[in-house]
Structures are given as structure tokens and as C-alpha cells.
Amino acid sequence: MVISNANSRPIWLVTESSLAQFAATQSAAARAVLSAQSFNAERHRVLLLPSEAGEPIAAVVLGLGALESIDQLRWWHVAGLPDKLPAGRYHFADVLPDRVSYQCELGWRLGDYRYLRYRATPTSSRAQLESPVGDPSKQAERRAAACNLTRDLINTPANDLGPAELETVMRDLAARHGAEFRSIVGDDLLGANYPLVHAVGRASDRAPRMLELRWGNERHPRVTLVGKGVCFDSGGLDLKPAAAMLLMKKDMGGAAVAIGLAKALIERAAPVRLRVLIPAVENAVGDRAFRPGDILRSRRGLTVEIGNTDAEGRLVLADALTEAQSDRPDLLVDFATLTGAARVALGPELPALFSNDAALSQILQTLGDQEADPVWPLPLWDSYDEELTSRIADINNVSSSSFSGAIFGALFLRRFIEPSTPWVHFDLYGWNARERPGRPVGADAQVLRLMDRYLAERFG
């Protein structure tokens, strides 16, 4: 059988098609264990092999199912290992191609994530991975850390993560990396011409604010990230039903993704001039709440009739996107948990992608599939645009139609985008609705790894 290493136990990756070849390299005793356990390399199945000396664990065999080759492995194939293995140190036994080594390392780190802030009892020791030295490991570590920060932010309940706490997170990130940071708070938003951000957040006793981080060399390409930072969304005066409010702590998921991506870019010293804008608000009910039928003037100067106060995310993004174009970015990306309609169309696991650049949409979809961080393009359908018309203002924040809600949300945002600005809008869910290896029910950092990879391939 496999000889145990006193410091670390090997993990063998075995597909259904490679099982016979793997078994042939093992001792008779090891083959007997494989047979006795009816191990057929089923996906996610883990088998522990004892040593010749009788030690209970000398090696681990992980089934990969029907993969045709190890090159098809994705991070979620190995993400269940930290939960299934006893405490101790482990390493992947094979010399893996860089792209596979990256996926294995990423899967372990994402699968090892736990949100423990509110647990009174200490956690027991867990399995630990010995990482190989090299760029794939560093890249996986950096991206996983960024994803896990995003997950922490989304998982934190609104009583402990409001606009001020979101500011603290961004301010600390800026301080650690020598970035510029500023915040415009409360009624100062009016003097700074962020009227929509102020209107959405003014009913809460937690002051709304506009958060901005800048980092990088001025001579590098300009990349601007905008994240919807609605720290809790009651729906405003168009109050949500109780069931729809249960997950509204995650309505700042777009901001969390933008902050996590900023962390990933800064920590790899990406050659970009990075700007992050987060309109941070709580959409509350109170005597200062904005009302259905109100007419509000935006930063761009367009007037907006409020057809529904529960369509508040697009309002705060409108002011932020207007400002985001002030220095003519080479790429503008916004992230938002914007519409339930996107979930109806695509489900919780597939974020909707909108862009004014069709070729860019295609590239992002392809990279998302390769990175196992998928997206699906939806159209900015021009003939629907007129349904956002208001009789007394420049635009209504909702359509009277019950169809195509995700498209209407994106078309509303497009009204605040200059045609010459390369723009991508992600309508994401930010939440795992079902339990899977490495993806427990809870926060999900959707599109973060995709965008980090795209920016690395485009700008370096």
C-alpha cells in the first residue's frame, strides 16, 4: 500500500476511466481496499487508504467521476475535501499542470471557508493543504482570499454592516495599500450633487454615503468598478413582503464583489489605474423616505419619476455611474443585485451580463466558462427603452410592463452611460441557494474570479 509520509498525506485524483490504471500501480492490499469499498471513482467520493504498517490514513483517493481527463477538473471537484478529511496535513500527489494545480488549490481554499463570526463554540482542528510553490498557488490564494472577503461581507447581517461599516472596510483596504480614499456622508451628498444617493438613503438613521477608492499609476489604463451598496432593502414605502426581506442583507452584494475584486487587483499589483465607487445606503421606511410619484433630479441632470421605491438600486447606481465616467475610464464595470427578474430568467447560479460591447460580452462568457465562474449575456433591447418613459419627467425608474425586468433595469442604467464608454453591467444574486461542495448555503462572490482573470489577460 501507499507509504505514509509523517508530515503530509498524498491525495490521488482518479477519474472513472483512470481507475484501473491507478489500481494497477497500487499494492494488492490497496486494491483489496478499493474493491471492498466498491470504489468506482464516483464524483466527490473520498476513500481513505491505510498504510502497510496499519496506520488508519496513509493516502486519500478522490473520485472525479466521468471526466475524460484531469485537464477538465474544476475547483468544485475538490472543494469538498476540507470537510471530508480528518485533521492533518495533505498534498496533491500528482505533478499537475499549472491550470489544474490552480483549480485544486482554489477548490480547497474556497471549500475551507467558514463564516464563524457569531459562533460561540470554538471550531475543531481542520485538514490543511500543503501548497506547492509557484504562481498557480499564489493566484489561487489571492483570488480565494478576495472571494472569502466578499462572502464575509455578504454574510454579515445588516445590524452589523451598514453604510458606515462598509466605509470602514474600504477605508482599511485603502490604508493597507497606500490608496486614496474619500467619503461623502449624509446631507453633504446634496452639496456634492449626489441627489439620488441621498434620496434613497435619507430615511434611515444610518447616513447614506458615497465611497471612493483610487489606486495605481495614473499612466496605466483606467478601470472603474461600481458596486451597489444597499446594506438593507426594506423596499421603502413600497414595502417588501416579509419573505422577500429575509435575504436583503445581501443587497450590498455588488459592493462586496467590487471591494473583493479591488483587493485582488491591488494585491497582485495589477498595472491599472483603479477606481472604486460605492453608493452605500439603507433603503428604510420613515418620515423622510422618498415616495412613489416623486420626481428626483439625478447627478447627470435627468429627472426621474419614482414608479416604485423598491427599484432603488438603479437610482444610487445612476449617480455613481455618472461620476464614474468623469475621468473617461477605459473600462467601466458595475456589479449589482439589481432584479429578481434576472433570477427568474437565469436562476441564482448564473448572473446576467449586459454590455454595450458585444465582443466583450462574448469574451467574458467564454472566460467565465473556463474559470467555472459563469455568466450569461442578455440584450440591451432598444425597442423596450421607450417603456421607461414618464409623462412628466425624463425617465421612470420602472416600466409598467411585468415582463423583461432585468432588461429594463439595465436599460435604465444605460441612460446614464455615454455611448463611448466601454461598459459592463452584472445583475447577480450573490447567494448560494442550495448546498454543494465548496458552496454552502450563503454568500457567493459571483463574477469576481472571472473579472480578475479578464483584467489580467487584457491589461496584464
Image (spheres, grey):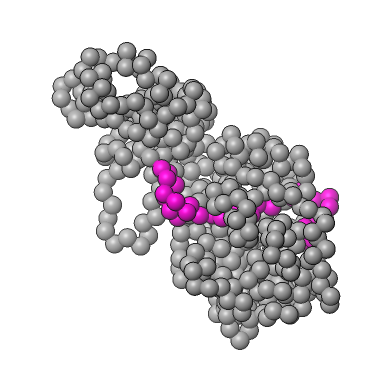
153 falls in the magenta region: no
Q: Is residue 284 left or right of residue 190?
A: left
Residue 84 image point, x, y percent: 31, 39
Residue 286 image point, x, y percent: 58, 83
Residue at the limit of the structure toward the bottom, as seen here = 287
State the quadrant of the C terminus: top right
The residue drawn where x is 61% and y is 79% is 237
Report if residue 340 is visible in the image. Answer: yes
State the quadrant of the N terminus: top left
Determine which quarter of the picture holds residue 287. bottom right
Q: Which residues are magenta?
A: 413-442
Residue 458 vertical placement versus 435 (above, below): above
Determine which quarter of the picture holds residue 214. bottom right
The residue drawn where x is 56% and y is 55% is 429
Residue 21 image point, x, y percent: 37, 14
Determine which quarter of the picture holds residue 201. bottom right
